[in-house]
Image (tube, grey):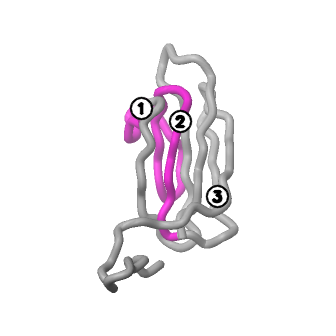
């Protein structure tokens, strides 16, 4: 796991450096992304449409965790873990941006 950066006084700063971003289509069919090549243990997810995401393998469904459009969220990942995504019923197709944080 990445250690926290330190400020000029040596105090921990809760910030991570963004790494590579994977962009994937979010449609009415579940799509799986990852595992991230960087091996990042924290990811930033940003979706252009309301969607549902599922961590750890499997198929995302309308019962999976919701991710609101335009609202970035941060999650920890286990080594080799994947993320599946599907758009919410009635939403247009969109994109999911997955950024590994280091």
The reply to whether the magenta stretch includes residue 54 is: yes
In front: label 3 or label 2: 2
Secondary structure under badge 1?
A: loop
| Magenta highlight on residue 35 | no
Q: Are marks 2 and 1 in contact (CB under 8 Å)?
A: yes
Q: Which mark is residue 101?
A: none
Residue at left offset 58%, top offset 17%? 92
**Which element carries disc 2, helix, strand or loop?**
strand
* Residue found 30% across the figure and 81% down from its top: 11
Q: Name the residue under label 1.
A: 68
Give the crowd class for mark 1: few <14, some 14-19, many >=20 residues within 10 Å.
some
Q: Which residue lies furthest to the bottom in this view?
A: 10
Question: What residue do we see at 52% from left, 41% from top?
Answer: 46
Write down the residue under mark 3.
34
Q: In this view, does 10 lie above or below 58?
A: below
Q: In this view, does 102 lie to the left or right of 8?
A: right
Can you name the residue that lies furthest to the top here? 90
């Amino acid at each position: 796991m990445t250690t926290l950066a330190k400020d000029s006084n040596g105090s921990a700063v809760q910030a991570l450096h963004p790494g590579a971003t994977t962009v994937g289509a979010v449609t009415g069919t579940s799509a799986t992304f990852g595992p991230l090549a960087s091996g990042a243990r924290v990811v930033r997810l940003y979706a252009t449409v309301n969607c549902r995401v599922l961590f750890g393998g499997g198929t995302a469904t309308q019962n999976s965790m919701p991710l609101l459009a335009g609202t970035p969220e941060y999650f920890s990942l286990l080594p080799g873990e994947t993320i599946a995504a599907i758009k919410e019923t009635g939403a247009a197709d969109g994109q999911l941006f997955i950024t590994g944080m280091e």
